[in-house]
Image (cartoon, rainbow, N blue to C red):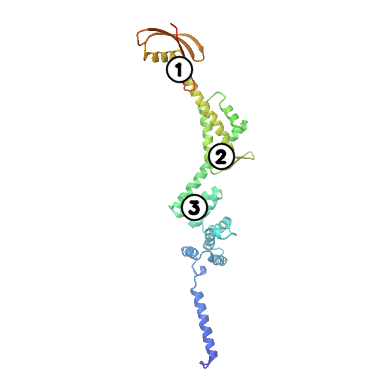
Amino acid sequence: MERFKNPTAYLIILGTILCLSFVTYYHYKPSALKIPLKDIDKHLAYQKEKGIESLEEYKQLLEFYPNSFEANYLLAKFYSNNQSKISSVNSNDVEKLLLKSWEVNSNFFDSNFMLAQIYYDKDEISKAEKFIKLAESVGGNNKGVGDLKSKIDDVILLTMVKDSVLHRYTNDVRKSLYTAQELYSYYTFVGYNEYYHSYIQNMVEDLDHISLRFDKLEYNGKIVRTSDIKKEYQGCLDKIIEKKKQNEIDRQISDICGLQPQKEFLTNRLSLKFRLIDIYPVEQLGNCKYSWHVEFYDTYGRLNNYRMTTGVNRDKIGIEVFEVYKLY
């Protein structure tokens, strides 16, 4: 201090320099408030660069411009990108800010798209459909829009299927059908029926699809689990399929149960090794079972007379020779 003839002047100059330094620093220091609101891309880049540190800046920006669609959108975007870091923020906060932004400017693509995503996640599909259509109209062809629109369309389709299933299920319940056995008894009272098979199978397939989105269905004020409904229809379908298989087996057995098919079987089998002279039925021993008298020459030219019994093997679904003994 002794070097200076006027210490007071020195202090004044030093203070002035420091003040100018602070002013210069804060003038050039990056801040959300210094980025024009219309430069949304710059704001988003700034948010990404600064991260959670810029939260207060965007809150302050909204305080300064509460009716700006940009300010509302930018804070909503910040919240959306940083929800895991801000425990006090949830999708409802984002939704409110986006709706305020949308009220001011309904032609901004990202607000419409984000709202569509929020309502899709909340299962408010009619709202999601509204906003994805708006996003599509202002954003043109966009893969994100296309993917989300496809998901929303799928839910709309599933909802239609759900309503159809619910109507059919309610109709069945009104007929006092509550279990797989009762469903089976009702729909197969005249045996296997292709129409009812198709009906029950469609119910199971539809319930497979809607269970991916709807865990429960409501009818007449009652809540029913989709999985429980499917279980009953699946049980009925299993019984119908088993009945169809049994009917097919019965049909095949019926075709070989008669006298003529079994005579042809025995004739063809013996003719492979012997010269057959005569074969005729002796008696019917039971259901699909016959006794035959058979006369033939063996490979040595000797005459043989046999009694043979043929019948149906239900396990193998074929004709077999069960008993053979020589007469003389």
* Tag shown at residue 128: none
Picture quadrant where residue 90 is located: bottom right
Task: Work out how far the residue at label 2 is from the one at label 1, CA to CA, in angstroms.
Answer: 54 Å
Mark 2: give few (<14), some (14-19) or many (20+) Cα within 10 Å: few
Residue type (three-letter) at the residue carrying disc 2: Asp
Q: Foreground residue, 143 or 236?
A: 236
Q: Does residue 104 appear in this view?
A: no
For the residue pair 246 and 289, the one nearer the viewer reads as 289
Tell me which numbered mark, 3 or 1, is placed earlier along the sequence.
3
Q: Earlier in the sequence, mark 2 or mark 3?
A: 3
Q: CA distance from mark 2 to mark 3?
A: 27 Å
- Residue 138: x %, y % from top left: 46, 55
Q: Amino acid at mark 3?
A: Leu
How far across and down, in percent of the image, does residue 53 sit?
53, 66
Q: Residue furthest front?
A: 300
Q: Are marks 2 and 3 in contact (CB under 8 Å)?
A: no
**Amino acid on which disc 1 is placed:** Glu
Classify mark 3: helix, strand or loop. helix
Residue underneath mark 1 = 320
Extreme residue in the bottom direction: 5
How many residues crowd mark 1 within 10 Å: few (<14), some (14–19), many (20+)? some
Q: Are the residues flagged by discs 2 and 1 in contact, CB closer than 8 Å? A: no
Which of discs 3 and 1 lies nearer the camera? The answer is: 1
Alpha carbon of mark 3 to alpha carbon of mark 1: how far?
A: 74 Å
Name the residue beneath numbered marker 3: 134
User: Mark 1 falls on what kind of element?
Assistant: strand
Q: Secondary structure at mark 2?
A: helix
Which residue does the numbered mark 2 point to in the structure image? 163
Residue in the foreground of this view, choosing between 260 and 70: 260
